[in-house]
Image (cartoon, rainbow, N blue to C red):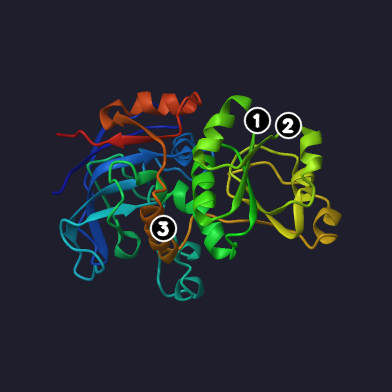
Amino acid sequence: MTSYRAWAAPKPGAALEAFEYDPGPLGADEVEITVDHCGICHSDLSMLDNHWGFTQYPFVPGHEAVGRVTALGANARGVVMGQRVGLGWNAHSCLHCDPCLAGNQHLCRELQPTLAGRHGAFAEKVRAHWVWVVPLPEGLDAAECGPLLCGGITVFAPLRELGISPTARVGVVGIGGLGHMALKFCRAWGCEVTAFTTSASKEEAARAFGAHHVVATGDAEALKKLAGKFDLIIDTVNVSLDWNGLLAALAPEGRLHVVGAVLEPIAVSAFSLALGQKSLSGSPTGSRGALDSMLGFAARHGVAPQNEHFPMSRVNEALDHLRAGKARYRIVLDADFG
Protein backbone atom coordinates (compact mmCIF):
# COMPACT_ATOMS: atom_id res chain seq x y z
CA MET A 1 0.00 0.00 0.00
CA THR A 2 1.23 3.46 -0.97
CA SER A 3 0.54 6.31 1.46
CA TYR A 4 0.74 10.04 0.82
CA ARG A 5 0.84 12.56 3.65
CA ALA A 6 -1.18 15.73 3.14
CA TRP A 7 -3.23 18.50 4.73
CA ALA A 8 -7.00 18.14 4.35
CA ALA A 9 -10.22 19.84 5.43
CA PRO A 10 -12.83 17.37 6.80
CA LYS A 11 -15.77 19.71 6.03
CA PRO A 12 -16.55 23.18 4.61
CA GLY A 13 -14.80 25.98 6.47
CA ALA A 14 -12.86 23.63 8.74
CA ALA A 15 -9.19 23.99 9.53
CA LEU A 16 -6.89 21.66 7.63
CA GLU A 17 -5.66 18.59 9.49
CA ALA A 18 -2.84 16.12 8.95
CA PHE A 19 -4.17 13.45 6.60
CA GLU A 20 -2.89 10.31 4.89
CA TYR A 21 -4.39 8.52 1.93
CA ASP A 22 -3.67 5.69 -0.49
CA PRO A 23 -3.58 7.04 -4.07
CA GLY A 24 -3.85 3.56 -5.55
CA PRO A 25 -1.77 2.22 -8.45
CA LEU A 26 -0.05 4.82 -10.64
CA GLY A 27 -1.98 5.19 -13.89
CA ALA A 28 -0.25 4.41 -17.17
CA ASP A 29 -0.49 8.08 -18.27
CA GLU A 30 0.27 9.54 -14.84
CA VAL A 31 3.30 11.23 -13.37
CA GLU A 32 4.03 11.34 -9.65
CA ILE A 33 5.50 14.61 -8.38
CA THR A 34 7.17 15.01 -5.00
CA VAL A 35 6.07 18.50 -3.97
CA ASP A 36 8.69 21.01 -2.84
CA HIS A 37 6.55 24.16 -3.00
CA CYS A 38 2.88 24.93 -3.60
CA GLY A 39 1.20 28.30 -4.00
CA ILE A 40 -2.07 29.20 -2.33
CA CYS A 41 -4.72 30.66 -4.64
CA HIS A 42 -8.10 32.23 -3.84
CA SER A 43 -9.55 29.24 -5.71
CA ASP A 44 -8.26 27.07 -2.88
CA LEU A 45 -10.35 29.12 -0.45
CA SER A 46 -13.42 28.88 -2.68
CA MET A 47 -13.03 25.12 -2.91
CA LEU A 48 -12.35 24.79 0.83
CA ASP A 49 -15.62 26.54 1.62
CA ASN A 50 -17.50 24.80 -1.24
CA HIS A 51 -18.52 28.14 -2.76
CA TRP A 52 -18.82 26.51 -6.19
CA GLY A 53 -20.79 23.50 -4.97
CA PHE A 54 -18.64 20.57 -6.11
CA THR A 55 -15.99 20.13 -3.38
CA GLN A 56 -15.62 16.60 -2.03
CA TYR A 57 -14.40 16.03 1.54
CA PRO A 58 -11.94 15.28 2.99
CA PHE A 59 -10.47 17.92 0.70
CA VAL A 60 -6.76 18.45 0.00
CA PRO A 61 -6.26 21.87 -1.64
CA GLY A 62 -3.33 22.97 -3.78
CA HIS A 63 -2.86 23.44 -7.52
CA GLU A 64 0.28 25.55 -7.96
CA ALA A 65 2.81 22.82 -7.30
CA VAL A 66 6.52 22.74 -8.04
CA GLY A 67 8.53 19.60 -7.40
CA ARG A 68 10.44 16.69 -8.87
CA VAL A 69 9.29 13.70 -10.91
CA THR A 70 9.58 10.59 -8.73
CA ALA A 71 7.51 8.04 -10.65
CA LEU A 72 6.36 7.60 -14.26
CA GLY A 73 3.45 5.59 -15.64
CA ALA A 74 4.17 3.22 -18.53
CA ASN A 75 2.82 5.66 -21.15
CA ALA A 76 4.01 8.92 -19.58
CA ARG A 77 6.19 11.10 -21.79
CA GLY A 78 7.70 14.56 -21.96
CA VAL A 79 9.43 14.39 -18.57
CA VAL A 80 12.08 12.21 -16.94
CA MET A 81 12.79 10.99 -13.45
CA GLY A 82 14.15 13.68 -11.15
CA GLN A 83 13.17 16.53 -13.48
CA ARG A 84 11.97 19.80 -11.94
CA VAL A 85 8.35 20.33 -13.03
CA GLY A 86 5.21 22.30 -12.26
CA LEU A 87 1.50 21.45 -12.06
CA GLY A 88 -1.29 24.00 -12.22
CA TRP A 89 -5.11 23.99 -12.14
CA ASN A 90 -5.56 21.13 -14.62
CA ALA A 91 -4.53 17.53 -14.04
CA HIS A 92 -6.21 15.53 -16.82
CA SER A 93 -7.63 16.00 -20.32
CA CYS A 94 -8.99 13.33 -22.65
CA LEU A 95 -6.79 14.35 -25.64
CA HIS A 96 -9.39 13.13 -28.17
CA CYS A 97 -12.26 15.66 -28.05
CA ASP A 98 -12.40 18.55 -30.53
CA PRO A 99 -10.96 21.17 -28.12
CA CYS A 100 -8.07 18.85 -27.16
CA LEU A 101 -7.29 18.04 -30.79
CA ALA A 102 -7.29 21.78 -31.53
CA GLY A 103 -4.68 22.33 -28.80
CA ASN A 104 -7.15 23.68 -26.25
CA GLN A 105 -6.76 20.97 -23.62
CA HIS A 106 -7.93 23.41 -20.93
CA LEU A 107 -11.36 23.44 -22.62
CA CYS A 108 -11.63 19.64 -22.68
CA ARG A 109 -15.12 18.25 -22.10
CA GLU A 110 -13.66 15.76 -19.61
CA LEU A 111 -11.25 18.18 -17.93
CA GLN A 112 -10.27 17.23 -14.38
CA PRO A 113 -8.86 19.95 -12.11
CA THR A 114 -5.95 19.08 -9.84
CA LEU A 115 -8.11 19.51 -6.72
CA ALA A 116 -11.58 18.41 -7.87
CA GLY A 117 -12.43 14.72 -7.75
CA ARG A 118 -8.87 14.05 -6.57
CA HIS A 119 -6.52 15.24 -3.85
CA GLY A 120 -4.46 18.37 -4.51
CA ALA A 121 -0.91 19.43 -3.82
CA PHE A 122 -0.91 20.50 -0.16
CA ALA A 123 0.78 17.13 0.15
CA GLU A 124 4.12 15.41 -0.06
CA LYS A 125 3.19 14.01 -3.48
CA VAL A 126 0.61 14.65 -6.19
CA ARG A 127 -0.28 12.94 -9.47
CA ALA A 128 -1.42 14.18 -12.87
CA HIS A 129 -1.64 13.17 -16.53
CA TRP A 130 1.72 13.73 -18.21
CA VAL A 131 0.34 16.38 -20.58
CA TRP A 132 -0.21 18.76 -17.64
CA VAL A 133 3.14 18.12 -15.94
CA VAL A 134 5.19 21.06 -17.22
CA PRO A 135 9.01 21.13 -17.28
CA LEU A 136 10.36 24.33 -15.76
CA PRO A 137 12.72 26.31 -18.01
CA GLU A 138 16.13 27.44 -16.88
CA GLY A 139 16.01 30.86 -15.27
CA LEU A 140 12.92 30.31 -13.12
CA ASP A 141 13.32 30.11 -9.35
CA ALA A 142 11.56 26.88 -8.32
CA ALA A 143 10.76 28.30 -4.88
CA GLU A 144 8.99 31.35 -6.33
CA CYS A 145 7.39 30.34 -9.63
CA GLY A 146 4.46 28.21 -8.36
CA PRO A 147 1.84 30.99 -8.62
CA LEU A 148 2.67 31.37 -12.32
CA LEU A 149 1.09 27.95 -12.90
CA CYS A 150 -2.44 29.19 -12.16
CA GLY A 151 -2.50 32.95 -11.58
CA GLY A 152 0.27 33.65 -14.06
CA ILE A 153 -1.24 31.70 -16.94
CA THR A 154 -4.67 33.17 -16.20
CA VAL A 155 -3.46 36.71 -16.92
CA PHE A 156 -0.92 35.78 -19.61
CA ALA A 157 -3.24 33.70 -21.79
CA PRO A 158 -5.40 36.67 -22.92
CA LEU A 159 -2.32 38.47 -24.27
CA ARG A 160 -1.34 35.38 -26.27
CA GLU A 161 -4.73 34.12 -27.36
CA LEU A 162 -6.31 37.49 -28.23
CA GLY A 163 -3.36 38.61 -30.34
CA ILE A 164 -2.61 41.68 -28.23
CA SER A 165 -0.04 43.93 -29.87
CA PRO A 166 2.98 45.27 -27.96
CA THR A 167 1.72 48.73 -28.96
CA ALA A 168 -1.65 48.17 -27.27
CA ARG A 169 -2.96 50.24 -24.41
CA VAL A 170 -4.01 47.86 -21.66
CA GLY A 171 -5.84 48.47 -18.39
CA VAL A 172 -5.63 46.08 -15.44
CA VAL A 173 -8.36 46.20 -12.80
CA GLY A 174 -7.05 45.17 -9.38
CA ILE A 175 -3.54 44.99 -7.90
CA GLY A 176 -3.84 41.77 -5.97
CA GLY A 177 -2.70 38.22 -6.45
CA LEU A 178 -3.73 38.17 -10.11
CA GLY A 179 -3.45 41.85 -10.90
CA HIS A 180 0.16 42.36 -9.89
CA MET A 181 1.21 39.56 -12.24
CA ALA A 182 -0.96 41.01 -15.03
CA LEU A 183 0.86 44.34 -14.67
CA LYS A 184 4.23 42.61 -14.92
CA PHE A 185 3.28 40.55 -17.97
CA CYS A 186 1.64 43.46 -19.80
CA ARG A 187 4.66 45.70 -19.22
CA ALA A 188 7.06 42.98 -20.39
CA TRP A 189 4.79 42.40 -23.43
CA GLY A 190 5.50 46.01 -24.43
CA CYS A 191 2.09 47.53 -23.72
CA GLU A 192 1.24 50.91 -22.23
CA VAL A 193 -0.22 49.79 -18.91
CA THR A 194 -2.77 51.48 -16.66
CA ALA A 195 -3.64 50.05 -13.24
CA PHE A 196 -7.15 50.52 -11.82
CA THR A 197 -7.27 50.23 -8.04
CA THR A 198 -9.62 51.07 -5.18
CA SER A 199 -6.65 51.64 -2.87
CA ALA A 200 -4.61 54.81 -3.29
CA SER A 201 -1.98 53.25 -1.02
CA LYS A 202 -1.15 50.75 -3.78
CA GLU A 203 -0.10 53.34 -6.37
CA GLU A 204 3.60 53.01 -5.63
CA ALA A 205 3.37 49.21 -5.76
CA ALA A 206 1.41 49.34 -9.04
CA ARG A 207 4.13 51.42 -10.67
CA ALA A 208 6.80 49.08 -9.33
CA PHE A 209 4.95 46.15 -10.92
CA GLY A 210 4.94 47.89 -14.30
CA ALA A 211 2.04 50.35 -14.50
CA HIS A 212 2.73 53.54 -16.43
CA HIS A 213 -0.46 55.11 -15.04
CA VAL A 214 -2.67 54.50 -11.99
CA VAL A 215 -6.39 55.37 -11.79
CA ALA A 216 -8.80 55.12 -8.86
CA THR A 217 -11.53 52.64 -9.77
CA GLY A 218 -14.22 54.59 -7.92
CA ASP A 219 -13.36 57.95 -9.53
CA ALA A 220 -16.13 58.35 -12.11
CA GLU A 221 -14.68 61.61 -13.45
CA ALA A 222 -11.24 60.08 -13.95
CA LEU A 223 -12.85 57.15 -15.77
CA LYS A 224 -14.76 59.51 -18.09
CA LYS A 225 -11.49 61.18 -19.08
CA LEU A 226 -10.24 57.80 -20.28
CA ALA A 227 -13.13 57.27 -22.71
CA GLY A 228 -12.02 55.51 -25.88
CA LYS A 229 -8.46 54.88 -24.66
CA PHE A 230 -7.94 51.14 -24.13
CA ASP A 231 -7.56 48.28 -26.56
CA LEU A 232 -7.92 45.79 -23.72
CA ILE A 233 -9.01 45.93 -20.09
CA ILE A 234 -8.34 42.83 -17.97
CA ASP A 235 -10.53 42.51 -14.88
CA THR A 236 -8.73 40.48 -12.20
CA VAL A 237 -11.07 41.05 -9.23
CA ASN A 238 -14.08 39.05 -8.04
CA VAL A 239 -16.47 41.94 -7.32
CA SER A 240 -19.01 43.80 -9.44
CA LEU A 241 -17.71 46.94 -11.16
CA ASP A 242 -18.98 49.84 -13.23
CA TRP A 243 -19.12 47.60 -16.30
CA ASN A 244 -20.59 50.19 -18.64
CA GLY A 245 -18.03 52.74 -17.47
CA LEU A 246 -15.22 50.30 -18.27
CA LEU A 247 -16.72 49.56 -21.68
CA ALA A 248 -16.84 53.30 -22.36
CA ALA A 249 -13.10 53.45 -21.66
CA LEU A 250 -12.44 51.01 -24.49
CA ALA A 251 -11.36 52.16 -27.93
CA PRO A 252 -13.46 51.00 -30.92
CA GLU A 253 -13.11 47.22 -31.23
CA GLY A 254 -11.67 47.12 -27.71
CA ARG A 255 -12.27 44.24 -25.34
CA LEU A 256 -13.16 43.94 -21.66
CA HIS A 257 -11.82 40.55 -20.57
CA VAL A 258 -12.83 38.99 -17.24
CA VAL A 259 -10.53 36.55 -15.43
CA GLY A 260 -11.67 37.32 -11.87
CA ALA A 261 -14.33 34.96 -10.50
CA VAL A 262 -17.21 37.45 -10.37
CA LEU A 263 -20.21 35.53 -9.02
CA GLU A 264 -22.88 38.17 -9.73
CA PRO A 265 -24.31 38.59 -13.26
CA ILE A 266 -22.51 41.20 -15.36
CA ALA A 267 -25.09 43.75 -16.48
CA VAL A 268 -24.10 45.74 -19.57
CA SER A 269 -26.02 47.77 -22.11
CA ALA A 270 -26.18 46.30 -25.60
CA PHE A 271 -25.37 49.74 -26.98
CA SER A 272 -22.18 49.85 -24.85
CA LEU A 273 -20.99 46.93 -26.95
CA ALA A 274 -22.60 47.52 -30.33
CA LEU A 275 -21.83 51.18 -31.00
CA GLY A 276 -18.07 50.74 -30.72
CA GLN A 277 -18.04 47.13 -31.90
CA LYS A 278 -16.63 46.21 -28.50
CA SER A 279 -16.39 42.80 -26.85
CA LEU A 280 -16.93 41.34 -23.40
CA SER A 281 -15.19 38.01 -22.86
CA GLY A 282 -13.58 35.76 -20.30
CA SER A 283 -11.20 32.84 -20.02
CA PRO A 284 -10.08 30.20 -17.51
CA THR A 285 -6.38 29.28 -17.30
CA GLY A 286 -4.72 28.22 -20.55
CA SER A 287 -3.68 25.32 -22.73
CA ARG A 288 -0.55 23.26 -22.20
CA GLY A 289 1.06 25.17 -25.07
CA ALA A 290 0.15 28.46 -23.42
CA LEU A 291 1.71 27.27 -20.15
CA ASP A 292 4.98 26.46 -21.89
CA SER A 293 4.90 29.82 -23.68
CA MET A 294 4.16 31.71 -20.46
CA LEU A 295 6.92 30.04 -18.44
CA GLY A 296 9.45 30.64 -21.21
CA PHE A 297 8.40 34.29 -21.49
CA ALA A 298 8.60 34.74 -17.71
CA ALA A 299 12.10 33.23 -17.63
CA ARG A 300 13.35 35.45 -20.46
CA HIS A 301 11.85 38.67 -19.11
CA GLY A 302 12.30 38.13 -15.39
CA VAL A 303 8.57 38.05 -14.63
CA ALA A 304 7.95 36.54 -11.20
CA PRO A 305 5.17 36.77 -8.62
CA GLN A 306 5.80 38.59 -5.36
CA ASN A 307 5.44 35.94 -2.68
CA GLU A 308 5.36 35.36 1.03
CA HIS A 309 6.46 31.94 2.30
CA PHE A 310 5.08 29.68 5.03
CA PRO A 311 6.10 26.12 5.95
CA MET A 312 3.34 23.76 4.83
CA SER A 313 2.87 22.71 8.46
CA ARG A 314 1.61 26.28 9.09
CA VAL A 315 -0.94 26.04 6.29
CA ASN A 316 -3.86 27.21 8.44
CA GLU A 317 -1.97 30.35 9.44
CA ALA A 318 -1.20 30.98 5.77
CA LEU A 319 -4.87 30.53 4.80
CA ASP A 320 -5.99 32.94 7.52
CA HIS A 321 -3.42 35.45 6.24
CA LEU A 322 -4.93 35.20 2.76
CA ARG A 323 -8.53 35.37 4.00
CA ALA A 324 -7.69 38.55 5.92
CA GLY A 325 -6.46 40.21 2.74
CA LYS A 326 -2.94 40.57 4.12
CA ALA A 327 -1.06 38.58 1.46
CA ARG A 328 1.47 40.64 -0.52
CA TYR A 329 0.81 39.39 -3.09
CA ARG A 330 0.85 35.59 -3.29
CA ILE A 331 1.60 32.90 -0.71
CA VAL A 332 3.80 29.85 -1.28
CA LEU A 333 3.92 26.86 1.05
CA ASP A 334 7.26 25.10 1.44
CA ALA A 335 6.89 21.35 2.03
CA ASP A 336 8.26 20.24 5.39
CA PHE A 337 6.96 16.70 5.82
CA GLY A 338 10.46 15.52 6.74
**Residue 297: assigned label:** 3
**Which x, y percent locates residue 71?**
17, 58
**Above or below 78: residue 11:** above
Q: Nearer the viewer, residue 158 or 317?
A: 158
Residues at marks 2 and 3, CA–CA distance in whole angstroms: 33 Å
Amino acid found under the numbered disc labelled 2:
Gly
**Residue 306: assigned label:** none
Residue bearing the label numbered 1:
198
Can I make out residue 313 in this image?
yes
Residue bearing the label numbered 2:
218
- Could you tell me which quadrant the C terminus lies in? top left
Q: Secondary structure at mark 2?
A: loop
Residues at marks 1 and 2, CA–CA distance in whole angstroms: 6 Å
**Above or below 115: residue 290:** below
**Above or below 197: residue 99:** below
Point out the tag, 1 or 3, that comes first from the N-terminus: 1
